[in-house]
Image (tube, grey):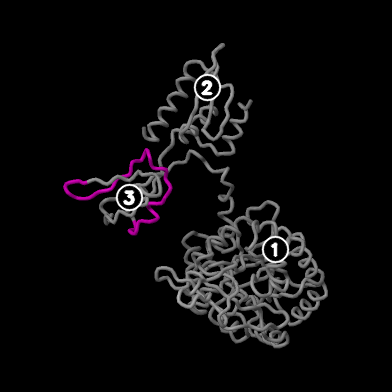
Amino acid sequence: MADLRINLAGIKSPNPFWLASAPPTNSGYQVQRAFEAGWGGAVWKTLGEPILNVTSRFAAVSYNGQRVAGFNNIELITDRPLEVNLKEIYETKKRFPDHAIIVSLMVEPKQEKWHEIVKKVEDVGVDGLELNFGCPHGMAERGMGSASGQVPELVEKQTYWVKEVARTPVIVKLTPNITDITVTAEAAARGGADAISMINTINSLAGVDLDSWNTVPHVGGKGAHGGYCGPAVKPIALNMVAECARNPLFNVPISGIGGISNWQDAAEFILMGATGVQVCTAAMHHGFSIVEDMIDGLNNYLDDKGIASVMDLVGRTVPRYSDWGNLDLNYKIVAEINNDVCINCNKCHIACEDTSHQCIDLYSESGRPMLKVREEDCVGCNLCSIVCPVDGAITMVERKSNIAPMTWNERQSLISNFAR
Amino acid sequence: MSDHLLSLDEMKKVDNYLDTGYKVQYVYENLSGMFIEFERQEEEVCLQITTAEARKYFAAKLQE
């Protein structure tokens, strides 16, 4: 049994699986049930001046039968008074002293507002704070959430104000609705953030109803943009985590968020530099009990890899992530088709012929249809293996190059020696 | 000519120049590909390389 305990900027948790600040962490009842199910921590749904919500609030994007491939919401922060939340936080912490309770906060970008809420929240005994600079809808129209999270100076300043009074670790939650998230991550670090979490949701409109012409979701015939999350956003989130993790100017722990649905997703985020992960959509889709498989799966994975502690997995892939200019131009892979497994759907041929490099030939052998890759024309793009519906029918195999490894940056440097 | 055959042809031309005593003087790239100016004694020639594989190959030859 591997050690799944984590320590994220001083916040200790029995495992790396936290519920993200969202509807699943709206109340003490929910968070306590989540802890009973096995979640190691929870980021309490964002506290601030109680808001008013609308109905409806959620919409999902399903794709080819996959329910909730993406999830869109227009729900705002807590609509309950601060005192009610604090009482439940206190009771929850008392009942689960070893679990991590982090409280998400959002107030106007004013020093006195941050000081007031930080002091009140820390007085009930929380393990950490998460500053919500990421929520893209509703609150952003009032100058909070992503509206302030998109301005590095505001991220730095508000983080600094919080750190002036905070006694517990401060996590800054970043918005992905920005060109380069490392800029705001660095701003958070300059402000004194003990950790960052990412990503919050992405600006989105789930769809348009082709019969009514209403947006999805709509509120009495009118819609507004929401925040997108769920499995569809995982690659975006993973890259943003990785970009921060590999940034030499940035050296604070990361809590990974964005489409994490199972232990494999969690392990990927951890490998890319996240010390722990936060989950929302998968819990909303399948319930709190999904954490059981996450814990078992990660445990078994670490055991199989011979890794004693999940903390030893953190960032192991980061050195393998770089700029395009540092990739070897002469590394070569090609597609190899196993005609014994192939079902002759020809999707690979069609994809290659129509949209790639026209290197998969159809031919017949003793009347049997066959496919063959012309290796000399194959650029190793992977497309055929991506569209192939049969595992093992197409394998991408390495071919030793006769040319020595050389990156684009090395090439340009060499060629510059022969410029006029 | 296929892209592969064209790249082989271009690589062969690079090899021919280098094997026969030509030295690379200037290299520049533009929308039409790569242009290599070779020189041997007083003689100057310019070779255009259009294929990606040959452009990679030439860079590797520069490294040798």
The amino acid sitting under disc 1 is Gln
**Viewer-nearest residue: B53 or A141:** A141
The amino acid sitting under disc 3 is His
Residue A184 to residue A25: above or below: above
x 56%, y 39%: residue: A408
- On whether residue A396 falls in the magenta region, the answer is no
Tell me the chain of label 1. Answer: A
Dot 2 falls on a residue whose secondary structure is strand
Q: Which disc is residue B46 wearing?
A: 2
Dot 3 falls on a residue whose secondary structure is helix
Q: Which residues are magenta?
A: A364-391
- On whether residue A390 falls in the magenta region, the answer is yes
Q: What is the distance, in whole Å, between disc 3 and disc 1 at their CAs?
A: 45 Å
Q: Which disc is residue A349 wearing?
A: 3
x 57%, y 55%: residue: A316
Q: Which disc is residue A150 wearing?
A: 1
Residue A291 to residue B1: above or below: below
